[in-house]
Amino acid sequence: MPTLPSFLTATASRHGARPALIMDDRVLTYAELDASANRVANSLIRHGVRGGDRVALWMPKSLEAITSIWGVLKAGAAFVPVDPAAPVARLATIARDCEIRALVSALDRADDLRDAFGTSAPMRTVLYAGDGPIPPPAPRWVSQRWNEVEAESAQPPPLHSDDAGLAAVQYTSGSGGTPKGVAVSHRTFAGQAEWTVTSLGLSTEDRIPGYTPLSGAMSTFEIFAGVLAGATVYPVPPRLAPFPAAVAKSWSDQRITVIYVVPSVLQMLLNRGNLGALDFSALRIIVTGGEHLPAQRLGELMRLLPRVRFIISYARTEAKLRTLHEVKFPPEDIDTRTIGKTAAGSGLLVLGEDEKPVADGAIGELWISGPCLMLGYHGLPEMTAEVMRTIRLGRSESVLACRTGDLVRRHASGRLELIGRADEQIKVRGYRVETAEIESALCRHPAVHAAVVLAVPDPETGNRLKAVVVLKDGSDDGEQTLRNHCATELPPYMVPETIEFRASLPLMSNGKVDRRRLRES
Amino acid sequence: MKSIEGAIREFLLQLPTARKIRELKRGDSLFQRGLLDSMGVIRTVAFCEETFGIEIRDEEVIPENFESVRALSRLIKRAQSRSG
């Protein structure tokens, strides 16, 4: 299996003059993207970044951000994408957790970085996108501005050929109270991209919008599969992204051919996108997944776009298989719960609590095996060993598999049906959220005695977060104070929209909080 | 009664994206400060429709109308004159 930079160099040599990225009015051809990525790589290498080092990205989606991902990979390092909307405190937690060697950020975040890291920053270098001087005083790390990066040599740096090496650490919400880093190899991303390009028939003729945040696992669709296919990616400018009608119109104007977004974005487009008035004649495929899409909403979308193929996909950050299940028109009985076909070599196992296969028709937990698996949670060997285990399939056969926490049922027909979660993990606008992490953040506030976070249905976004809080005696802090407190530690999508105060929480006989009673009351 | 701009300002400042922002002038860019993400826009539309008893059309939910407190207030006044 090739390493990821070979995708870019191969496409650049075959289709160098074709547009790789188009954003606002800027076009970057494949030759230009390849050269810019070399410059970023050479800058990082000159500043001491070596193979296997981690380099974080904390900046809004931009051509510089995407170029930097390729530059980090070409330097032989692993990229660590951090939600640009997350507070700097979360970046600092992640940066220290995986000991980043360098950071790529935007110039208007320089003050935040200095405030958050002070004198104990793990990174030795920060590359800044944007124009203007770096505000004083000088921090402890070496700063480089983008015009200096652009003055670096465009010669390709030495190639790293270890396809089992680390390519990225993707942080996801952790049930232990802090985010955990999913370490992924080149081989795993490359295999996922090859499967995606082949199964969807992606080519140089495709135009793909880049809507998903680079910090999300789904963005590898536009980054790696897009480049492997030689397609043109249109990263959605952050200013435009929150506006459904503006996004839909831009996709119509760009004659987008393949869309891959989470169901909540499809719902946003359905509710406010004015889709019926727009020309989507170039659009051939919509892929969606990552959270449940109500069948009725999918039906509405299918009726609006009758010539488009609709595909439901399933993947985990820890297991990058990207299964594909095509929903058939007419939408009388729309099946959005099937986990579809996947690349050869990936196994979908339905196991009981004893980690042994259950009979067809019975509900079990989905485990995944094959080359799509993560390397492990970064720096957490015990937690990795809890989810990645050797599963015995027969007398002499066994495989390494990763538990998903998703409950499924395999029907006699072979159909694999997604039933729900085995734990408290939820999805909010496509983001994976462990309520325990929000509860920990709430409990770090001095006025909070206990807190429980629940997802409640919301017509616009699918789910919204609600916290139920018991304050310590004598405290009278209000909803806004606690929300502000959460916002300094957590990304905005994890901040509860409503906070309800109670004198106590309902308990079950085993002493745990009775979440069902809270949800129903 | 609160002014339209005052009510919008108060609403925006309690969004989770407001974080360290304590003050919002009527011309300040809501994008520059990272205040409006997709959730923020959805909630702002719902807030304006409920608070001012108006209907904001889909094609009006575009960056130009959400540029600043002043732009939002103009959008609301336009919607009010339509229904009134």
Image (cartoon, grey):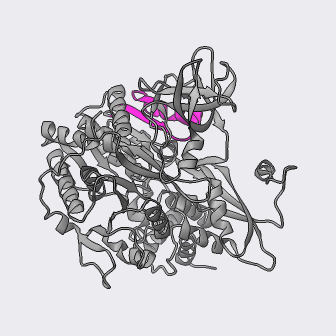
Q: Is residue A306 magenta?
A: yes
Q: Is residue A209 left or right of residue B60?
A: left
Residue A302 or residue A466, whichever sits in front: A466
Residue at the far right: name it: A509
Residue at the far front: name it: A396
Residue at the far bottom: name it: A137
Q: Residue at x 36, y 47 (%)?
A: A166
Q: Is residue A414 magenta?
A: no
Residue A184 appears in which quarter of the rendering?
Answer: top left
Estimate the x, y position of residue B77 in percent, counting from the top left. Answer: 50, 69
Q: Is residue A515 left or right of residue A428?
A: right
Q: Is residue A344 above or below residue B75?
A: above
Q: Is residue A236 visible?
A: yes
Which range of residues does the magenta coloring cover?
A283-310
Q: Is residue A308 above or below residue B47?
A: above
Q: Is residue B45 visible?
A: no
Residue at the far top: name it: A413
Residue A239 appears in which quarter of the rendering?
Answer: bottom left
Residue A445 or residue A232, whichever sits in front: A445
Estimate the x, y position of residue A477 in percent, counting from the top left. Answer: 71, 77
Q: Residue at x 24, y 65 (%)?
A: A47
